[in-house]
Image (cartoon, rainbow, N blue to C red):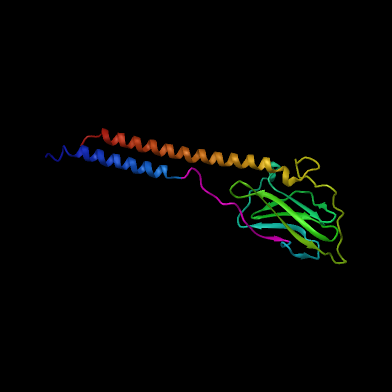
Amino acid sequence: MNPIRSRPPRLLRRSALAALLLGALTLGIPAAPAFAHNSVLGTVPAADSVVTEQPGTITITTNDNLLDLSGEGAGSAMQVSGPTDAPRYYGDGCATVAGPTLEAEVQLGQPGEYTVVWQTVSTDGHSISGTFAFTWQPDANQVLDAGSATPTACGAADAGSSGVADTDAATSDGAGAAVDATDLIWIGGALVAILAAIGLTLLLLRKRP
């Protein structure tokens, strides 16, 4: 058999194999990178602790940076209420993000058990929330805040409602838009790689030995 005539079938087989391998690798790329929700590492005051001095700032610290959507008027909020037998609400309902930490300035009122309800945006763009309680036993030197009879809204939240509840819709919409944009980028990249593999195969098939 003439060795020159055997080259085109061999080249065809190698080109087809290369295209199949490249296509398989391209299709194996995930549509979008997977991120986990932030998890809480600790709070100040600590959950179920006894507090004797005004905390000034209540903080929730997570294991990764949070998304700061404060410029959009939505995303993070914190509601502090107590004591449980005659609850009032303290602070303005807003919370700020500092890296992995969510914080709010709050002055407490009468002694008793207090509850903190918070919401923010995880590093993956999804809304996360939680709650914890602590006991407030102020010493004689503490100045007590009067509080409010109704929850205080934050930013664009409706009056008379909790900022924590009112930010759900805005946060979910923002997270969905971010995820959709990432999906489109990865899908577009996969299509370009597949088209490049097909083009390379056709180019090699047209060449003669």
Between 132 and 109, the one nearer to me in the picture: 132
Side of 156 where 190 appears, left or right:
left
- Quadrant for the C terminus, please: top left
Kindly indicate the quadrant of the structure image that contains residue 137: bottom right
Residue 36 on image: x %, y %: 56, 52
Return the x and y of residue 115 as percentages of the image width and height. 76, 56
Name the residue: 30% across, 34% down. 203
Q: Please give the name of the residue rendered at 69% of the width and 57% of the height, measured from the top-left corner.
A: 60
Q: For the stretch drawn in magenta, what is the main secondary structure?
A: loop
Query: Residue 149: x, y in percent?
Result: 85, 49
Please tell me whether residue 153 belongs to the stretch shown in magenta: no
As displayed, is residue 105 above or below residue 191? below
Please give the count of numbered marks on the rendered protein. 0
Image-based side of 4 in relation to 37, left or right: left
Picture residue at 52% right of the left edge, 40% below the top: 183
* Extreme residue in the front direction: 85
Q: Does residue 32 show up magenta in the picture?
A: yes
Is 182 on the left or on the right of 86, as rendered? left
Q: Start and end of the magenta stretch?
A: 30-44
Spot the residue most to the top: 206
Could you tell me which quadrant the N terminus lies in? top left
Specify whether 128 is left or right of 138. left
Question: Which percent across, then down, holds residue 119?
Answer: 69, 49
